[in-house]
Amino acid sequence: MKISIQINASPYQYQAADTAWNFIQAAIDKGHEIYRVFFYHDGVYNAHRDSRPPGDERDIVKRWSGLQVEHGVDLVVCVSSAQRRSLLEQSVASKVGGYENALADGFRIAGLGLLMEAVIESDRHVTFGA
Amino acid sequence: MLRLVLKVKTLFFIINKSLQGNVCGQEFLDMALMAAAFDQKVVLLFEGEGVNALVKNQCPEGVGLKNILPILNALPIYDINDVWVEKESMEVWGLVEEKLEISVKSISREVIKKQINAADHVFSF
């Protein structure tokens, strides 16, 4: 089954990112395809390159980057949500000014169109974080 | 590049929280508008506390927030014509149709349940 994922909540403060992570692992193990993970609302903080949790805790951002490396999952951060929340990627920062390297490896920035495409193309669209 | 998308799905957007107070309501409406721009069949349902978003004469500018009433008025331009409100929620919040900014279809919880089951995807925030 083709599944797309939407994450609406920031990491660490809510369980959404962890639950989504476990869901995705289980889905891949069962042979399903994760078409895209779309980060929206405060979910964009999952992509913050400068997140540095204490060494004995899970590193949520690194874990996402690893998912992209290991399984080639498309990690997309909503551009307008991200701009509001100070997460700019180079092409955006060069236009509006600001820190150019905010997104961790493996994430890309794009518009809501990519969310809609994922919804339309997938058999299931699962949202984490109300 | 996006591929040309021809599939049409029924996408159900449930607004059950206030649209003011944080930016999520506004971002949620953006999703619904984008779905309509992709020629999907969009149903917008207001229920619970969310029904208050429809009340006339709101002035959120007074506390520095964006007014979403112009977006609600523009829904037909986006071809979003299925705008529903849950009948029971209207009663709970003491609202009648004359108090609302736009014309909506008042639908009972029972019917809504069936419609949600029939939708391809359901969104809330």
Image: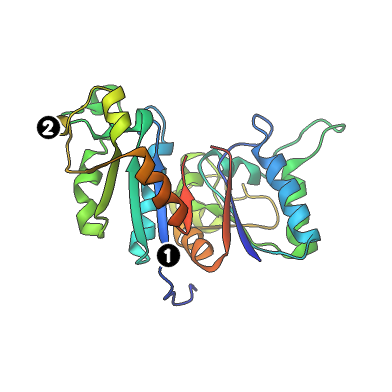
Which residue is identified by label 1?
A: B9
Judge from the rendering whether residue A104 lies leftward or rightward of residue A56; answer left or right: left
| Residue B65 seen in the figure | no
Q: Position of residue A34 (x, y in %)?
A: 67, 62
Determine which quarter of the picture holds residue A67.
bottom right
Residue extending furthest toward the front: B110
Front-lying residue, A124 or A130:
A124
Q: Chain of mark 1?
A: B
Calculate the distance from the C-alpha at mark 1 to the C-alpha at mark 2: 32 Å
Disc sitting over residue B98 in the figure: 2
Name the foreground residue: B84 vs B110: B110
- Image point 78% across, 40% down: which residue? A59
Q: Residue at x 19, y 46 (%)?
A: B73
Which quadrant would residue B70 be assigned to in this image?
top left
Q: Are marks 1 and 2 on the same chain?
A: yes
Residue A109 in picture, x, y percent from top left: 55, 56
Question: Which amino acid, mark 2?
Answer: Glu
| Picture coordinates of residue A31, whole percent (x, y) | 77, 65
Mark 2: few, some, or many residues within 10 Å (few <14, many ≥20)?
A: few
Give the mark count: 2
- The answer to whether marks 1 and 2 mark residues whose Cβ atoms lie closer than 8 Å is no
